[in-house]
Image (tube, rainbow, N blue to C red):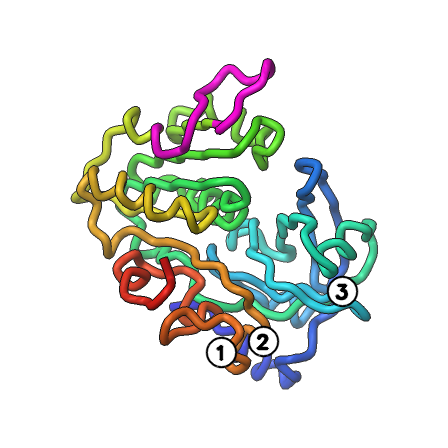
């Protein structure tokens, strides 16, 4: 059951369109384009009421500028703050990138439907991320890490255009040596610093073994990669109802009222952004 932000707002007796003030408590530069922001809600009552699922998003406000939908990168098990991995691409994200620790921003949310974490328990997990798609999947990966005993084999396939564009590279470099996670990374274009695989993320499927009867899959990345990653998962005989994708659209209100994020006959902000692949295949213009 997805965490419904409107219920949180109603329980606190506040306007669901009004952002909660939050303080930036940490900023980490990940690449030339992306930064990781740790943000803490200021009001204690609001902070204690705020819960979310991996795969959900918030609307981040820069007062006087606007707001933008951002996926949550931290695990739900980490209380008191959230992490947002933000690429500088427009007015709002550009204004956020100019902020410093201690500055105040606004948050609304959480919104949408996340990954079926409880259903995934007791199963093997296959996660495939491309580029910025690792940001929402990082929340799921860390949540699995925090409850590692609840899961079987965990395999992560990660692709990026170049070594310099790999997000959270320091963390994943450490995870490559863990025995309880199987991590494979590749880049489209290698340089002299790269000693790993070169090529599309789909080629990594040749290196893994999957038990199709006991595996959940999740895909997040550029929409163009979904079709080809899905084909590789089907070659491994994964059930289409156990493969989940995150369909990002231009979410605006977060509550299915403005119509900006229509995907076929559904709205990404309330019916998604996480859909099973079976659902996604039946949405007009979704894939």
Q: Secondary structure at mark 1?
A: loop
Query: Crowdedness of circle 1 by 10 Å Cα count: few (<14), some, many (20+)?
Result: some
Q: Are marks 3 and 1 in contact (CB under 8 Å)?
A: no
Q: Secondary structure at mark 3?
A: strand
Q: Position of residue 18 (x, y in %)?
A: 69, 78
Q: Position of residue 260 (x, y in %)?
A: 53, 74
Residue under the point 55% across and 65% down: 250
Query: Crowdedness of circle 2 by 10 Å Cα count: few (<14), some, many (20+)?
Result: many
- Kindly identify which residue carries mark 3: 62
Is 27 rendered above or below residue 188? below
- Kindly identify which residue carries mark 1: 256
What distance separates the C-alpha of mark 1 from that of mark 2?
7 Å
Considering the image in quadrants, where does the N terminus appear? bottom left
- Answer with the quarter of the image where residue 145 lies: top left
Q: Position of residue 6 (x, y in %)?
A: 54, 79
Magenta portion: prevailing SS class = loop
Q: Are marks 1 and 2 in contact (CB under 8 Å)?
A: yes
- Kindly identify which residue carries mark 2: 253
- Tell me which segment is drawn in magenta: 187-203
Residue under the point 45% across and 22% down: 198
Please name whichever residue, 188 or 134, is drawn nearer the observer in this view of the structure.
Answer: 188
């Amino acid at each position: 059951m997805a965490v419904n932000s409107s219920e949180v707002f109603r329980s606190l007796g506040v306007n669901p369109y009004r952002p909660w003030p939050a303080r930036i408590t940490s900023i980490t530069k990940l690449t030339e384009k992306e930064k990781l922001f740790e943000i803490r809600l200021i009001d204690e009552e609001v902070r204690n009421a705020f819960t979310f699922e991996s795969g959900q998003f918030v609307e981040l406000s820069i007062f006087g500028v606007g707001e933008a939908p951002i996926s949550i990168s931290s695990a739900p098990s980490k209380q008191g703050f959230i992490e947002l991995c933000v690429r500088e691409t427009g007015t709002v994200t550009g204004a956020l990138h100019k902020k410093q620790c201690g500055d105040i921003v606004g948050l609304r949310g959480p919104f949408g439907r996340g990954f079926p974490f409880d259903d995934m328990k007791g199963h093997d997990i296959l996660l495939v991320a491309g580029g910025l798609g690792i940001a929402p999947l990082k929340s799921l990966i860390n949540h699995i890490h925090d409850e590692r005993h609840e899961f079987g084999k965990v395999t992560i396939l990660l692709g990026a255009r170049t070594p310099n564009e790999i997000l959270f590279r320091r963390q994943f470099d450490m995870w490559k040596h863990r025995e309880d996670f199987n991590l494979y990374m590749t880049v489209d274009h290698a340089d002299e610093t790269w000693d790993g695989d070169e090529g599309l993320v789909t080629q990594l499927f040749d290196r893994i073994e999957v038990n199709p009867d006991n595996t959940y899959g999740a895909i997040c990345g550029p929409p163009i990669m979904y079709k080809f990653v899905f084909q590789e998962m089907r070659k491994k005989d994964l059930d289409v109802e156990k493969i989940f994708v995150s369909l990002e659209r231009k979410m605006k209100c977060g509550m299915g009222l403005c119509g900006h994020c229509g995907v076929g006959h559904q709205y990404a902000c309330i019916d998604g952004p996480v859909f099973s692949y079976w659902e996604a295949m039946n949405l007009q213009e979704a894939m």
